[in-house]
Image (cartoon, grey):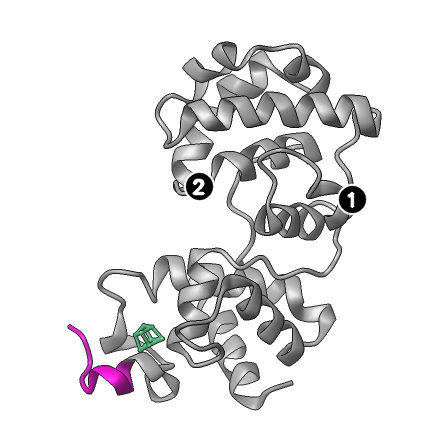
Protein backbone atom coordinates (compact mmCIF):
# COMPACT_ATOMS: atom_id res chain seq x y z
CA UNK A 1 0.00 0.00 0.00
CA UNK A 2 1.06 3.55 -0.66
CA UNK A 3 2.86 4.78 2.48
CA UNK A 4 1.31 8.24 2.44
CA UNK A 5 -2.13 6.71 2.16
CA UNK A 6 -1.40 4.24 4.98
CA UNK A 7 -0.36 7.12 7.19
CA UNK A 8 -3.35 9.25 6.25
CA UNK A 9 -5.80 6.42 6.96
CA UNK A 10 -4.12 5.74 10.31
CA UNK A 11 -4.50 9.40 11.25
CA UNK A 12 -8.14 9.38 10.16
CA UNK A 13 -8.78 6.26 12.23
CA UNK A 14 -7.26 7.92 15.29
CA UNK A 15 -9.61 10.85 14.72
CA UNK A 16 -12.72 8.80 13.91
CA UNK A 17 -12.33 5.32 15.43
CA UNK A 18 -16.06 4.62 15.12
CA UNK A 19 -16.50 5.68 11.49
CA UNK A 20 -19.39 3.77 9.95
CA UNK A 21 -22.47 4.17 7.75
CA UNK A 22 -24.69 6.88 9.23
CA UNK A 23 -27.85 6.13 7.25
CA UNK A 24 -30.27 4.38 9.60
CA UNK A 25 -31.43 1.00 8.29
CA UNK A 26 -32.45 -2.46 9.46
CA UNK A 27 -32.36 -4.37 6.18
CA UNK A 28 -30.84 -4.38 2.71
CA UNK A 29 -34.13 -2.92 1.48
CA UNK A 30 -33.99 -0.01 3.93
CA UNK A 31 -30.31 0.61 3.19
CA UNK A 32 -31.00 0.67 -0.56
CA UNK A 33 -33.84 3.16 -0.15
CA UNK A 34 -31.78 5.33 2.21
CA UNK A 35 -28.74 5.42 -0.06
CA UNK A 36 -30.89 6.25 -3.08
CA UNK A 37 -32.48 9.10 -1.14
CA UNK A 38 -29.11 10.40 0.02
CA UNK A 39 -27.97 11.61 -3.41
CA UNK A 40 -27.22 15.32 -3.18
CA UNK A 41 -28.60 15.58 0.34
CA UNK A 42 -27.34 14.83 3.83
CA UNK A 43 -27.65 11.60 5.80
CA UNK A 44 -29.31 13.63 8.56
CA UNK A 45 -32.06 14.78 6.19
CA UNK A 46 -32.57 11.20 4.98
CA UNK A 47 -32.73 9.81 8.51
CA UNK A 48 -35.52 12.28 9.28
CA UNK A 49 -37.79 11.00 6.53
CA UNK A 50 -37.10 7.26 6.48
CA UNK A 51 -38.89 6.22 9.73
CA UNK A 52 -42.31 7.25 8.39
CA UNK A 53 -41.50 5.96 4.91
CA UNK A 54 -40.41 2.54 6.21
CA UNK A 55 -43.43 2.40 8.48
CA UNK A 56 -45.74 2.93 5.49
CA UNK A 57 -43.68 0.75 3.12
CA UNK A 58 -41.90 -1.81 5.31
CA UNK A 59 -40.54 -3.96 2.49
CA UNK A 60 -39.80 -4.00 -1.20
CA UNK A 61 -43.08 -5.76 -2.00
CA UNK A 62 -45.17 -2.97 -0.48
CA UNK A 63 -43.06 -0.32 -2.18
CA UNK A 64 -43.43 -2.07 -5.54
CA UNK A 65 -47.20 -1.65 -5.35
CA UNK A 66 -47.02 2.10 -4.74
CA UNK A 67 -47.33 4.96 -7.19
CA UNK A 68 -44.57 7.54 -7.08
CA UNK A 69 -47.18 10.12 -6.05
CA UNK A 70 -47.81 8.02 -2.93
CA UNK A 71 -44.14 8.27 -1.96
CA UNK A 72 -43.62 11.96 -2.60
CA UNK A 73 -45.25 13.28 0.61
CA UNK A 74 -42.85 11.19 2.71
CA UNK A 75 -39.71 12.56 1.07
CA UNK A 76 -40.80 16.05 0.08
CA UNK A 77 -38.19 17.69 2.37
CA UNK A 78 -35.23 16.28 0.47
CA UNK A 79 -33.85 17.31 -2.90
CA UNK A 80 -35.03 15.82 -6.17
CA UNK A 81 -37.88 14.10 -4.37
CA UNK A 82 -40.07 13.61 -7.43
CA UNK A 83 -37.32 11.82 -9.34
CA UNK A 84 -36.35 9.85 -6.27
CA UNK A 85 -39.93 8.74 -5.62
CA UNK A 86 -40.20 7.45 -9.17
CA UNK A 87 -36.84 5.69 -8.96
CA UNK A 88 -37.72 4.05 -5.64
CA UNK A 89 -40.92 2.54 -7.00
CA UNK A 90 -39.24 1.35 -10.20
CA UNK A 91 -36.35 -0.09 -8.20
CA UNK A 92 -38.79 -2.02 -6.02
CA UNK A 93 -40.76 -3.31 -9.02
CA UNK A 94 -37.61 -4.67 -10.65
CA UNK A 95 -36.33 -6.24 -7.41
CA UNK A 96 -39.65 -8.05 -7.05
CA UNK A 97 -39.89 -9.08 -10.71
CA UNK A 98 -36.25 -9.96 -11.40
CA UNK A 99 -34.75 -10.82 -8.03
CA UNK A 100 -37.62 -12.42 -6.09
CA UNK A 101 -37.83 -9.45 -3.77
CA UNK A 102 -34.20 -9.77 -2.61
CA UNK A 103 -31.88 -6.79 -2.99
CA UNK A 104 -29.02 -8.12 -5.19
CA UNK A 105 -25.61 -8.61 -3.62
CA UNK A 106 -23.46 -7.79 -6.63
CA UNK A 107 -22.62 -4.48 -8.23
CA UNK A 108 -23.53 -5.79 -11.66
CA UNK A 109 -27.07 -6.71 -10.66
CA UNK A 110 -27.55 -3.63 -8.49
CA UNK A 111 -26.62 -1.43 -11.44
CA UNK A 112 -29.64 -2.81 -13.33
CA UNK A 113 -31.93 -1.04 -10.84
CA UNK A 114 -33.23 2.42 -11.64
CA UNK A 115 -31.66 5.08 -9.44
CA UNK A 116 -28.75 2.85 -8.42
CA UNK A 117 -25.38 4.09 -9.66
CA UNK A 118 -21.88 2.88 -8.90
CA UNK A 119 -21.64 4.77 -5.62
CA UNK A 120 -24.97 3.44 -4.36
CA UNK A 121 -24.12 -0.10 -5.45
CA UNK A 122 -20.75 0.09 -3.67
CA UNK A 123 -22.37 1.23 -0.44
CA UNK A 124 -24.95 -1.57 -0.53
CA UNK A 125 -22.48 -4.40 -1.22
CA UNK A 126 -20.01 -3.01 1.28
CA UNK A 127 -22.28 -2.09 4.19
CA UNK A 128 -24.88 -4.85 3.94
CA UNK A 129 -23.14 -7.73 2.19
CA UNK A 130 -19.61 -7.12 3.55
CA UNK A 131 -18.09 -7.15 0.08
CA UNK A 132 -14.99 -4.94 -0.03
CA UNK A 133 -15.80 -1.75 -1.93
CA UNK A 134 -14.90 1.92 -2.02
CA UNK A 135 -17.85 4.18 -2.74
CA UNK A 136 -16.54 7.51 -3.96
CA UNK A 137 -19.01 10.11 -2.78
CA UNK A 138 -18.39 13.84 -2.60
CA UNK A 139 -16.36 13.49 0.63
CA UNK A 140 -14.12 10.67 -0.57
CA UNK A 141 -13.51 12.48 -3.84
CA UNK A 142 -12.63 15.79 -2.15
CA UNK A 143 -10.34 14.24 0.46
CA UNK A 144 -8.58 12.07 -2.13
CA UNK A 145 -7.87 15.08 -4.31
CA UNK A 146 -6.84 17.44 -1.52
CA UNK A 147 -4.42 14.88 -0.11
CA UNK A 148 -3.05 14.10 -3.57
CA UNK A 149 -4.25 10.53 -3.93
CA UNK A 150 -6.00 11.54 -7.13
CA UNK A 151 -5.71 14.40 -9.60
CA UNK A 152 -8.09 17.35 -9.48
CA UNK A 153 -9.40 16.48 -12.94
CA UNK A 154 -9.98 12.78 -12.18
CA UNK A 155 -13.49 11.42 -12.68
CA UNK A 156 -14.94 9.62 -9.64
CA UNK A 157 -14.38 6.30 -11.41
CA UNK A 158 -10.67 7.15 -11.70
CA UNK A 159 -10.55 8.16 -8.04
CA UNK A 160 -12.09 4.80 -7.12
CA UNK A 161 -9.63 2.91 -9.30
CA UNK A 162 -6.62 4.77 -7.87
CA UNK A 163 -7.70 4.21 -4.27
CA UNK A 164 -8.31 0.53 -4.97
CA UNK A 165 -4.81 0.08 -6.38
CA UNK A 166 -3.26 1.74 -3.33
CA UNK A 167 -5.33 0.15 -0.55
CA UNK A 168 -5.47 -3.60 0.19
CA UNK A 169 -8.88 -5.05 -0.75
CA UNK A 170 -9.54 -6.07 2.85
CA UNK A 171 -9.32 -2.41 3.90
CA UNK A 172 -11.46 -0.88 1.16
CA UNK A 173 -14.70 -0.59 3.15
CA UNK A 174 -12.96 0.73 6.26
CA UNK A 175 -11.04 3.30 4.21
CA UNK A 176 -14.31 4.39 2.60
CA UNK A 177 -15.92 5.14 5.98
CA UNK A 178 -12.80 6.84 7.34
CA UNK A 179 -12.55 9.17 4.36
CA UNK A 180 -16.25 10.00 4.56
CA UNK A 181 -15.98 10.94 8.25
CA UNK A 182 -12.77 12.88 7.67
CA UNK A 183 -14.42 14.80 4.83
CA UNK A 184 -17.78 15.28 6.51
CA UNK A 185 -16.53 16.47 9.90
CA UNK A 186 -13.01 17.80 9.35
CA UNK A 187 -11.90 18.38 5.77
CA UNK A 188 -15.19 20.03 4.85
CA UNK A 189 -15.89 21.44 1.41
CA UNK A 190 -16.25 24.92 2.88
CA UNK A 191 -14.03 25.95 5.78
CA UNK A 192 -11.93 22.80 6.24
CA UNK A 193 -10.24 22.68 9.64
CA UNK A 194 -6.75 23.14 8.22
CA UNK A 195 -5.46 25.06 11.23
CA UNK A 196 -5.82 21.97 13.42
CA UNK A 197 -5.32 19.30 10.77
CA UNK A 198 -2.83 16.52 11.59
CA UNK A 199 -2.47 15.89 7.86
CA UNK A 200 -1.60 19.45 6.85
CA UNK A 201 1.99 18.43 6.05
CA UNK A 202 0.64 15.85 3.60
CA UNK A 203 -1.92 18.13 2.02
CA UNK A 204 -1.68 19.29 -1.58
CA UNK A 205 -4.58 21.69 -1.10
CA UNK A 206 -2.71 23.59 1.61
CA UNK A 207 0.48 23.67 -0.46
CA UNK A 208 -1.44 25.09 -3.42
CA UNK A 209 -3.07 27.73 -1.26
CA UNK A 210 0.28 28.57 0.31
CA UNK A 211 -1.25 29.22 3.73
CA UNK A 212 -3.37 27.59 6.37
CA UNK A 213 -7.03 28.56 6.15
CA UNK A 214 -8.49 29.99 9.32
S1 LIG B 1 -5.02 20.57 5.70
FE1 LIG B 1 -7.15 21.25 5.33
S2 LIG B 1 -7.59 20.69 3.20
FE2 LIG B 1 -5.78 19.54 3.85
S3 LIG B 1 -6.54 17.57 4.54
FE3 LIG B 1 -6.38 18.89 6.36
S4 LIG B 1 -8.39 19.86 6.56
FE4 LIG B 1 -8.27 18.98 4.48
Q: Which residues are magenta?
A: 206-214
Quarter of the rendered structure image containing ligand 1: bottom left
Give the number of the mark in front: 1 or 2. 1
Q: CA distance from mark 1 to mark 2?
A: 22 Å
What's the residue at 75%, 56% (across, down)?
Answer: 131
What's the residue at 36%, 83% (across, down)?
Answer: 203
Helix, strand or loop at disc 1? loop
What's the residue at 59%, 73% (across, down)?
Answer: 163
Helix, strand or loop at disc 2? helix
Residue 46 visible from this viewpoint: yes
Residue 105, numbered circle: 1
Residue 79 screen position, x and y as percent: 37, 32
Judging by the rendered image, the residue that carries numbered circle 2 is 43
Picture quarter containing residue 158? bottom right
Q: Residue 21, relative to residue 146: is it above or below?
A: above
Looking at the picture, tell me which residue is in the foreground, 80 or 210: 80
Amino acid sequence: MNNRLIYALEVMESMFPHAKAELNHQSAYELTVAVMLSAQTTDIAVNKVTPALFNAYPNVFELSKAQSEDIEPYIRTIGLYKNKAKALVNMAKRVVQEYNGIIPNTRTKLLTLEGVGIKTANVIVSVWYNVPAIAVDTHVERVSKRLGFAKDYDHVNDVERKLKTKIPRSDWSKAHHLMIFFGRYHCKAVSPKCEVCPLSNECRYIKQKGAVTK
